Image (cartoon, rainbow, N blue to C red):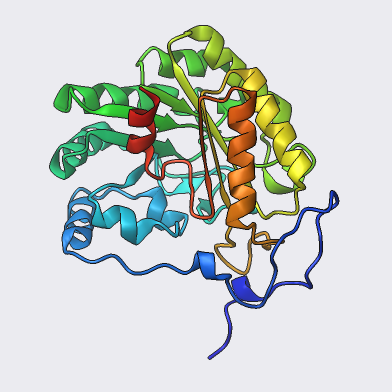
Amino acid sequence: MKKSKLNVLPENPELDDGSKVVLSGRFPKWLHRKLPAGSELWKTRAILKTLHLPTVCEEAKCPNLLECFSKKTATFLVMGKECTRNCPFCNIDFSATPKPLEKDEPDRIAQSVQALGLKHVVITMVARDDLDDGGARHLANIIHETRILNPETKIEILTGDFEGKTSSYDTVLAAKPEIFNYNIETVRRLTPKIRHRATYDRTLSLLRYICDHDSHQKVKSGLMVGLGETADEVKETICDLYDAGCDIITIGQYLQPSRHKFRVKAFITPKQFEEYANYGRSIGIKQMYCGPFVRSSYNAAALLDEKK
């Protein structure tokens, strides 16, 4: 049996600032997980299939998929399964001309949230640069319909940058999601290599705009590590996100979703993740969630509860 390309890594280096990393031909022990037990996983799959709803869990090959589905939770991927951006870290399909928006999608999302009994739902989206508002009105409709059918459910959204159009952000913010998440993804130096069209400074500018729009709006952002960044660069990014007004920061290990995508440069140790979390708290970040399997929407409901 051939080894996965994901597990074939270069020689063990140290990062530029001397931080220790782990590189080997196999995943380190902290990246091995037990399969979850129970039948809820199949019930979740059945509900999503019946309502024809894709999830970012499946499309992006999230390592937490089985765990989350077994807990009857998922992160909905709206506006289609094709993205108008082609970021080298992301497994979602690229298309410059994706399919039209589905008018009944807001209702199907709302029904799925009800069927799963979700008290906290995370809704993310593909980039839709083909639309004049980037899909902002459609996303606002999804929030409205979800809230009508599920008035007690907390709604967290994970958006793109809408090409920097603050009017699109105004449209989504007017729908009043409980958490507004927009990921910075990586450190400044690596942004041109990792992100397609989005920029580091525009990300910070839009996060500031969200914070300034409503002082009560909870704002969240996250980044991946293991892409070749240094510990000092990660700390610089944490500082930049703090200055932009973020309440919650997530940091997780990047895992190459296919051999065609950006290659893993390092497996970051749990100790290093703990150091990042402690650093963020020390400068005033209200909630740091850092670890090898952490993703933007992973255990999102628990994070909101902790922040109360």
- Horizontally, is 126 left or right of 265 in the view? left
The residue under the point 47% across, 48% down is: 82
Measured as percent of width and height from the top left, residue 1 is found at 53, 91
Measured as percent of width and height from the top left, residue 299 is found at 37, 43
In-front residue for pair 64/128: 64
In-front residue for pair 196/202: 202
Image quarter of the C terminus: top left
Q: How many marks?
A: 0
- Horizontally, is 308 left or right of 160 in the view? left
Q: Quadrant of residue 171?
A: top left
The residue under the point 47% across, 55% down is: 60
Measured as percent of width and height from the top left, residue 222 is found at 56, 37
Q: Quadrant of residue 191?
A: top right
The residue under the point 77% across, 47% down is: 230
- Horizontally, is 203 left or right of 60 in the view? right
Is the residue 278 above or below the residue 209 in the image?
Answer: below
- Horizontally, is 137 left or right of 45 in the view? right
Q: Is residue 87 visible?
A: no
Measured as percent of width and height from the top left, residue 273 is found at 60, 48
The residue sitting at the bottom extreme is 1
Q: Is residue 151 visible?
A: yes
The residue under the point 47% across, 8% down is: 214
In-front residue for pair 204/11: 11
